[in-house]
Amino acid sequence: MRRTLFQNIIRLLPPETTHGLRMALLGIVGKIPTGKWWLKLCHAPSRKFDIEREVFGVHFRNPIGIAAGFDPNGDRLNELAAMGFGFVEIGSVVPRPQPGTPRPRMRRLRKMNSLLDNSGYPSRGLEYVLDKVRKRTKHTRNLVIGCNIGKLTATHPDDISKEYLRVFRNMYQYVDFFVINAACNTASKQYVPRTREELLNLVEPLFEFRRGQLDYRPILLKISPDLTREEIDTVVDILIETPLDGIEAVAGSYDMEPSRQGAITGAMLTDRAIEVVRYVAERSEHNYPIIGTGGMMTEEDIKRMMEAGASLVALNTGIRENGVRLLNRAAKTIATPKQTEQTEQTEQQ
């Protein structure tokens, strides 16, 4: 994929610095009176593509969104909405602020077009994120917002379900869907629940709370690419047998490079992510929504992910490394041939 001069320049910086710079520039543009209009003009997919989706009862203007970890605290919701993303998944949201691991905590594996993430989910905590989502503006009023719930690094295993429930209850009326992170694996203290009992301990209290609410918020489970076939079967069985609404697959991989400290994301993960999504879709007979994430670096990767069975796709490393133009290119790629032809004819006129 061809990168712009700006992308090539900032890629000389460490990956976390590169991302911080991009997000800061987005914030500056967003404060300019015409900034959000400019972001929409330059980046938002054309309406001629007509790629709207209705997934787990929620309307998405397009199926391409932002994955958790890109804007973890919800600082750039206005700008990402203006750029035309179909949804933004904030988080992982945790009950209290946590700094993450000491820097440098991300490495760029240039030859493999991938990142090694050992960040430990730095977060400003629940109260900070709540303040952001409470203040929806006209720009974010129609943006679909998902909340990815994670755990504090220091939390004892017996208290994890209480943490998840606390975040879920407080965020419930402010977001459109939830992703329960069962793949918290980007720090030295990994937490990847694999058994039926461990997974049900996470989601059953959330189902119980939701039953007493007037509004319905879909709940999805995010899984690790390092699960065995039998462990994925367990997840799919839970999907079929409980009120779980869907699966998000996959997070970063620890097992792919066990000699390195951190989770692999990017091109090294592409084939495994698509393989897991395809298996979950086939195992569940394509009856449940899947958010495909992990390893989508090009528009062709996104197309393959959707062909494998993903209802929506969530981008992170692909945007970090290849720029936000990936959104527009992907929207054109996943449009039907007829839609694409009509759009090209309109643009030529």
Image: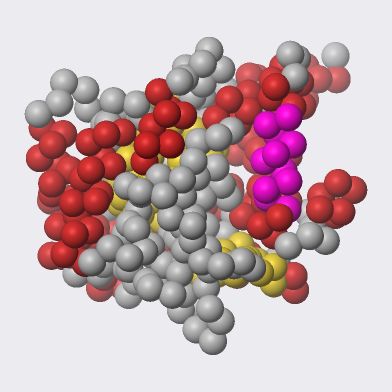
Foreground pick, 260 / 267: 260
Tell me: 278 left or right of 172: right
Q: Position of residue 90 (x, y in %)?
A: 46, 41
Determine the main secondary structure of the stretch shown in magenta: helix
Asked if 306 appears above or below 345 in the picture, the reply is below
Quarter of the figure that contains the N terminus: bottom right
Q: Position of residue 292 (x, y in %)?
A: 46, 50
Q: Position of residue 43 (x, y in %)?
A: 72, 29
Residue drawn at x 81%, y 53% is: 10
Residue drawn at x 23%, y 66% is: 156
Q: Report which quarter residue 244 is drawn in.
A: top left
Q: Inspect this view and state whether residue 85 appears.
A: no
Residue drawn at x 21%, y 67% is: 157
Foreground pick, 308 / 108: 108
Q: Which residues are magenta?
A: 18-28
Residue drawn at x 22%, y 27% is: 216
Q: Residue furthest right?
A: 5
Is 22 colored magenta in this rendering? Answer: yes
| Snapshot colouring | secondary structure
Foreground pick, 63 / 204: 204
Asked if 163 appears above or below 263 in the picture, the reply is above
Q: Residue furthest bottom?
A: 259
Quarter of the figure that contains the C terminus: top right
Q: Position of residue 212 (x, y in %)?
A: 9, 29
Is 288 colored magenta in this rendering? Answer: no
Q: Report which quarter residue 345 is drawn in.
A: top right
Tell me: 71 left or right of 249: right
Asked if 211 appears above or below 275 in the picture, the reply is above
Q: Inspect this view and state whether residue 105 appears.
A: yes
